[in-house]
Amino acid sequence: MPLRYVDPTKRHGRRYELIERFGRSRVGQAYVRHVASRIDPWVERVTGGALNQEWAVPSATLEATGAKSGVRRAVQITYFHDGRDAVVVASNYGGPKHPQWYYNLIAHPECQLGGERFVATEVTDSDEYARLYALAVQVFAGYGDYRAKTAPMRRRIPVFRLEPR
């Protein structure tokens, strides 16, 4: 199944809002970190991505080469589109450190998202960063929560633009 185009300006339905609200709750965060993050790649493979695309915040499997190991790594992440490019946010649930896949993309920018090939570039321009982060919050309001959690740590949550190859 090809990577679904995710329009960050699209209005969300009631079901989406309920799922998003659960995902932002304390119980939802625990579920996402400890259960969903482990089963989502499997669910995506088994259903061809249909279940994740219909029932949840849009996500796809990001495959990147390990920064140190050189081994191919896979992680399920939320994404959206800005024109032809996919955009991903390295929030790590608002934790103090960047997720491991951040370092993988920095070391090896060639990656796959949802089975499609991309080249990743970290967004460094402050205006572009602000615009894309605002769009990310429209896709999943939890990104606003994560930014609030990381502000006292002075951690700037990275945003990547994935350009199709």
Image (tube, grey):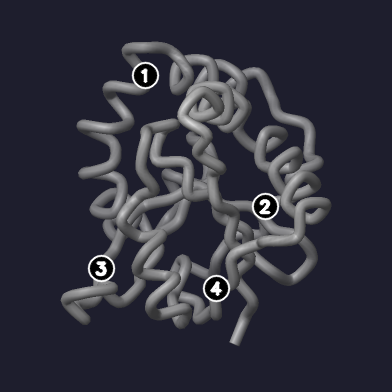
Which residue in the rendered view is the most extreme toward the bottom? 165
In this orientation, which residue lies closer to the viewer: 52 or 30?
A: 30
In this orientation, which residue lies closer to the viewer: 82 or 114?
A: 82
Which residue in the rendered view is the most extreme toward the top? 26
Which residue is found at the position 43% from the left and 50% from the top?
Answer: 77
Looking at the image, is mark 3 or mark 1 nearer the viewer? 3
Q: Which residue is mark 4?
A: 120
Chain-order first, disc 3 or disc 1: 1
Q: Which residue is mark 2?
A: 6
Q: Relative to residue 127, is residue 133 depicted above or below?
A: above
Looking at the image, is mark 4 or mark 2 nearer the viewer? 4
**Contact check, label 2 and label 3, Cβ < 8 Å:** no
Chain-order first, disc 2 or disc 3: 2
The kind of secondary structure element at disc 4 is: strand
The circle on residue 122 is: none
Q: Residues within 10 Å of mark 3 (few under 14, many from 20)?
A: some
Asked if residue 129 lies left or right of residue 151, the reply is right
Mark-to-mark CA distance, 3 and 1: 25 Å
